[in-house]
Image: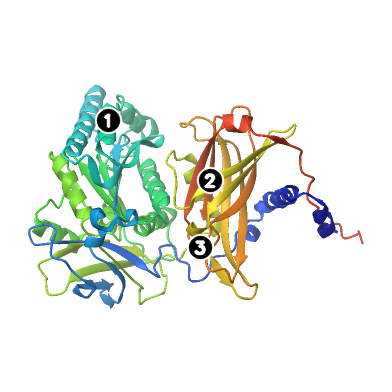
Amino acid sequence: MMDAMERKMPKSFRRRIVLVWLVVCWGAASAQVPAPPVDTLHVTTQLVTLDATVLDKGGRVVSQPLGRDDFLIEENKKPQEIYSFESAAEHMTAASGDAGKAPLLIFVLDELNYAYQRFNTSSWNVMEQLNEYVYERQELVSYLRDQPKVLSEPAEVLILTHHGYRILVEPTRDRGLLLDRVGKHDPGLGQPFRDLVEETGYGGSADLTLTKNSMKALESLALQQRGVPGRKVVIWLGIGGPNSVMPKPSNARNLTPAERYSRELMDLLVEARITLNVIGPGGDKPTPGVNGRNVSHYVATYRYESDFGFAGYISASGGQWRNSNDVRGEIQTSVNYGSIYYTMSYRPSKHDFDGEFRRIHVTVKGHPEWTVLTKGGYYAMQFGGEKDLAHQTQLDLSAATFEEMPFSAIGMTITDVERVKDTDKVFFTFRLDSNDLQWKSDSTKGVREADVTVSGAALGSVWAKNVASSQTATWKLTVPLETDNAPIGSEVSIMLSIPPKTQRLRFVVRDVTNGRMGTTDLSTAAVANAPVIEAPAPALQPRTDPQLP
């Protein structure tokens, strides 16, 4: 009966009926979100990618070209076979011309976390915060002035506030644009101090940082960059987030929520190929400095497996914590370390996922005096094993919904907007870049499939953290198995109510299998000018009354 009705309906209406059915059935998450394959991992431990910088005993980057056979990778002291290798020369943008192999510099101006001295007055602390911030910004401007008009690596500048990230400059190589935006930025006065007092009494943690906001900021950045090609060198200007230490759990299978979250966040940073560097003027934070012996000692002795906070994340990602009044010089050193590097990968010989830390150590054969600065390791957490996959998907979609930053790991464009007559509902159709999706072959069905989850949200101002209306649906995309490549684009749709007070719309797509995400935004004016269509007929539902024949 349903097949006969479908043949009589216009194609657009058939598509919308299927959409309505998907939306109605979303509550049964287990039916809509397929279980991941057994070999899909939270951190891509099937192929661990390392970005490595080689330093001599003086802390200078080694210029001597090295090959695959020069390196030794060990995981928990067991040698690993190198699967792929990219030389330092390949990452020099002038030589390679490949934007995907050039590192992305991400400058974060931290307007969230500030040192606070309880024995001084509030006005003194506010002025001290402002002076520190202005100095850090001026040092960034000084660093940019020393660069050529066209930067060697693309750079972006993010502002971290208690509302989340704000984009000051999107990725660019234009030094003039960076100088203009950073030089004119006014952080305001006293807001971070008010946040600390209002939210926590005095401070969010022992070192007076806002723990929840700082962790969410790292998570959002890692989610945004997960699946985006290339290395990302984060240069965090400010005091940074919390740096407390928790005792190592006796059983990794019985983790507390905080312990599980800290491990998953660390794996996210490693998977996204983020190297986290925190730089601030002076202060009481330890720093390895630029002396080669100090860097070597730091790499050999850091403790990441029990660190809850920035210290552990910096170590695991291969970055450094630098405190010096020469902020400009520290920025340059971090850029040098992050831009001249080798990329190599390996498949771990141990495949059990017990939640324990996997220590990574890389050396150059025949040169024990050299230090290889790279990821410190990852946690062997199974994607979808430690936490329900449908729940994790919703958390990721929510994080991407409220961030002002665009997510670009999956190309996502709006191709059609249609308003439903006499209702506040609107149909949105999107085209996804199929090359960004993970396709799985099913020989029994003769198709290749990709599972994606799409969400739409009607939001207020960029500062508001509430949703006026939202909707989520999961799609299973298919292409014939005999096709050589995935199609250029795949189409998905969603229906969303637009309440009168809506100021902006954000749509998010997430690959169910590998966690890649993409976003696109739309103004309410575009919805107001969209064509009007008749409401589609409701989809037929199966009978549930046992008394009916």
Coordinates of residue 161 in the picture (x, y in percent): 36, 34
Query: Considering the numbered disc 2 on the image, is that residue within a helix, a strand or a loop?
Result: strand
Nearer the observer, 250 or 216 = 216
CA separation, marks 3 and 2?
18 Å
User: Which mark, by number, is residue 484?
Assistant: none
Task: Locate the N terminus and report the quarter of the image it occupies.
Answer: bottom right
Residue position marked by numbered label 1 in the rendering: 180
Q: Residue at x 36, y 47 (%)?
A: 218
Q: Quick check: 52 left or right of 511?
A: left
Coordinates of residue 393 in the picture (x, y in percent): 53, 54
Q: Is residue 220 above or below residue 109?
A: below
Residue position marked by numbered label 3 in the rendering: 438
Amino acid type at mark 1: Asp
Residue position marked by numbered label 2 in the rendering: 413
CA separation, marks 2 and 1?
30 Å
Amino acid type at mark 3: Gln
